[in-house]
């Protein structure tokens, strides 16, 4: 698939392609800077291939320029095509692709803030990651910016989109919210109860994670990856470790792969249970929430028993897993079978409560074309009829040797998202059982030693969806680590999901999308 | 000892203390100053039916104006600094501040960088530090208990002022 694809692309754009490098299932094509819009548009619209990430690297020292990477995911052939353009420091401008591909919006603004590369023709060139009090001309991800620098605060104002008209008023919410959730700002424009516009403003929790990756050792980097988005610790750690393992060209022991599947799926189960509890809470159905929360807590306690950490931290290392869980097999299987039984009962019960169904059916609808246009990922995408799952499309760890069904719904509302999650809880429990029953004997990790120079992608299907890492290593240390959390793709969908819904339904819609602020802001 | 037993014993001690100092209940406002959301998972766990801390007289409130204590998580990011200060100022005195989690205690893995402030006590006074990444719910309850011991002194100080 990949080879044919590249050949066809070369035929179409031959004289615009300057360089081609293939390693593993990734093909890097360097193209002329002016041709980026034409080529990306062709791949995205004509060949219908999703754009999964855009990121920049500062390679001025080596190649005298910045490079921008557009990552496309060929789901049918388990391959990635990365289009690269070189951007010179003296004229740090390139053509924006946002007017053709909506999902490029935040990526281009992020690159503008972090590298100072200007996307010419971007429809919304406001600041994104750095706030208005950040001085001009200071770009944190440039190599000449020291991580300890504390730029002074300057005067500035962030201008929100205004909706005007008779009876229209604004409701500002956040960054400190009424519930125990992460910080972010929501600006609603409403006329009466229905929402006519929502603008989200995030990056309050921006902690400089990508810069930090460049300043710490590889061992510590696994520790940091676990803390990019706390409740998706395993997915992030595995994605990071896999990227490094791919650079090193090693295949980790089979037993480690199976243990990783168990951990990844345990994480999915507790997250989905928490989300279902949250939906019950937000429709004020306390009893349903109590049941779901009890099940979630049981998984958290199981996690602690088998790994020592309620959030499964410290269970991944480059080259495998540091601790075995094989001796806890019976306990895991027993707990999960009880949870599955109770969960099935709970879902039947929840779906029979008219006051709950009334709140979640047709609420917060994300139409298929909106989801596709914004490249929404994970359970949210699958609830809007997009049949994508990294575990199946780009198999990793022990997933190729397991059987599972990818649950897809068409409704796109809160109800559809709840159904997808409920299906996934049962599928995940099935996956854990399969992995534990066929756990191979042998080592659980291998010592990789020095990592050769190189770069590669690492990817997992986190509970929230496709998680991507792109790691570049030189002299056994990280020179660039791009993290693409699923929430970065899904946040913008909420601006569409809430339209024509009433303000009191916003918390349910928000919960049903299950978005991470920290993973998004980093 | 099971988790339920642990919680029962600690919860009763906490409840006694709260009754002695407040008469009825302690109101807490949680502030995320840039955490990775793991601490929020554990704070939310405190309200699940296993821990159910409301039965020990702890109420997690929606506004700092209703709070006796702020439970702050995260290293305090540059972008959250102002919001944290505003929340602190909105909380009536005498107030307690608990820094929850390694990053709230001293910045943790995020340290002191262009975006991360390196711990809550650089921005507002902290009464108690609850280490852990994230701290277990039992540790949070214990931390709240330790913080409560500091309150009588604070009340005395305020009363002594003319």
Image (tube, coloured by chain):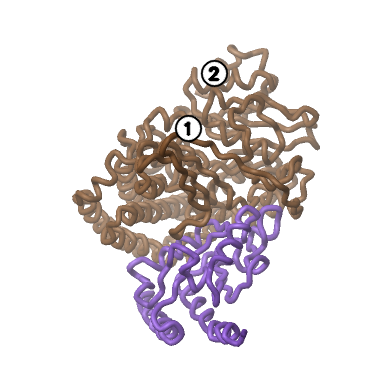
Chain colours: A brown, B purple
Secondary structure under tag 1 reads loop
Q: Is residue A503 at least partly visible in the picture?
A: yes
Q: Is residue A438 at least partly visible in the picture?
A: no
Q: Residue drawn 66% across and 26% down?
A: A120
Residue B72 quadrant: bottom right
The residue identified by callout 1 is A374
Residue B123 quadrant: bottom right
User: Is A466 left, or right, of A340 in this rendering?
Assistant: right
Counting from the top left corner in percent of width and height, residue A307 is at 47, 64
Counting from the top left corner in percent of width and height, residue B3 is at 38, 74
Q: Residue drawn 42% across and 35% down?
A: A166
* Residue density around tag 1, few if under 14, some if 14–19, many if 20 or more, within 10 Å: many
A522 w.r.t. A329: above or below: above
A377 w.r.t. B130: above or below: above
B105 w.r.t. A497: above or below: below
User: Is A6 left, or right, of A429 in this rendering?
Assistant: right
Q: Nearer the viewer, residue A46 or A399?
A: A46
The chain under label 2 reads A
């Amino acid at each position: 698939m990949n080879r044919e694809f590249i050949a066809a692309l070369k035929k179409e754009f031959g004289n615009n392609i300057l360089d081609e490098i293939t390693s593993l299932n990734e093909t890097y094509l360097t193209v002329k800077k002016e041709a980026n819009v034409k080529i990306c548009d062709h791949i995205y619209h004509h060949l219908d291939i999703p754009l999964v990430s855009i990121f920049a690297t500062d390679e001025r020292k080596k190649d005298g320029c910045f490079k921008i990477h557009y990552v496309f995911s060929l789901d049918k052939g388990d391959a990635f095509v990365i289009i690269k353009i070189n951007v010179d420091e003296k004229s740090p401008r390139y053509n924006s692709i946002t007017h053709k591909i909506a999902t490029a919006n935040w990526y281009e603004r992020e690159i503008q803030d972090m590298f100072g590369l200007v996307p010419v023709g971007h429809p919304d060139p406001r600041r994104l990651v750095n706030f208005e009090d950040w001085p001009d001309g200071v770009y944190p991800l440039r190599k000449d910016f020291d991580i300890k620098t504390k730029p002074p605060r300057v005067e500035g104002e962030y201008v929100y989109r205004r909706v005007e008209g008779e009876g229209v008023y604004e409701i500002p919410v956040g960054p400190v919210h009424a519930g125990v959730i992460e910080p972010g700002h929501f600006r609603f424009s409403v006329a009466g109860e229905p929402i006519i516009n929502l603008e989200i403003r995030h990056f309050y929790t921006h902690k400089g994670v990508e810069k930090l990756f460049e300043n710490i050792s590889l061992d510590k980097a696994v520790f940091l990856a676990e803390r990019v988005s706390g409740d998706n610790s395993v997915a992030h750690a595995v994605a990071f470790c896999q990227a490094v393992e791919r650079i090193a060209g090693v295949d980790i022991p089979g037993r480690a792969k199976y243990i990783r599947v168990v951990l990844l799926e345990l994480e999915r189960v507790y997250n989905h249970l928490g989300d279902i509890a949250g939906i019950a809470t937000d429709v004020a159905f306390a009893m349903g929430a109590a049941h779901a929360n009890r099940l979630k807590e049981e998984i958290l306690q199981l996690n602690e028993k088998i790994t020592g950490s309620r959030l499964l931290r410290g269970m991944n290392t480059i080259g495998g897993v540091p601790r075995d869980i094989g001796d806890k097999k019976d306990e895991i299987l027993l707990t999960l079978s009880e949870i599955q039984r109770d969960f099935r009962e709970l879902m039947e019960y929840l779906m029979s409560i008219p006051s709950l169904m009334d709140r979640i059916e047709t609420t917060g609808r994300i139409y298929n074309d909106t989801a596709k246009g914004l490249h929404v990922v994970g359970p949210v995408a699958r609830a809007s009829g997009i049949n994508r799952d990294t575990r199946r499309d780009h198999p990793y760890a022990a997933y190729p040797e397991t059987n599972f069904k990818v649950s897809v719904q068409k409704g796109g509302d809160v109800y559809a998202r709840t159904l997808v999650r409920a299906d996934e809880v049962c599928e995940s429990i099935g996956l854990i059982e399969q992995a534990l029953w066929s756990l191979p004997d042998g080592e659980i990790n291998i010592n990789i030693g020095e990592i050769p120079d190189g770069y590669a992608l690492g990817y997992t299907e986190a509970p929230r969806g496709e998680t991507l890492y792109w790691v570049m290593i030189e002299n056994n240390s990280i020179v660039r680590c791009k993290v693409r959390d699923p929430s970065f793709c899904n946040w913008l969908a909420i601006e569409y999901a809430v339209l024509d819904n009433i303000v009191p339904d916003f918390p349910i819609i928000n919960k049903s999308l299950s978005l991470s602020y920290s993973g998004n802001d980093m | 000892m099971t988790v339920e037993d642990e919680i029962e014993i600690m919860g009763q001690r906490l409840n006694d203390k709260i009754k002695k100092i407040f008469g009825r209940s302690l109101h807490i406002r949680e502030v995320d100053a840039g955490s990775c959301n793991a601490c929020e998972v554990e704070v939310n766990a405190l309200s699940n039916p296993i821990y159910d801390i409301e039965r020990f007289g702890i109420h997690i409130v929606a506004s700092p104006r209703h709070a006796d204590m702020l439970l702050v998580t995260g290293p305090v990011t540059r972008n959250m600094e102002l919001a944290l200060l505003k929340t602190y100022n909105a909380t009536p005195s005498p107030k307690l501040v608990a820094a929850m989690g390694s990053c709230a205690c001293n910045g943790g893995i995020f340290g002191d960088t262009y975006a991360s402030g390196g711990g809550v006590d650089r921005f507002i006074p902290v009464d108690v530090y609850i280490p852990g990444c994230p701290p277990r719910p039992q540790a949070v309850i214990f931390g709240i208990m330790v913080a409560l011991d500091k309150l009588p002194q604070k009340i005395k100080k305020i009363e002594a002022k003319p």
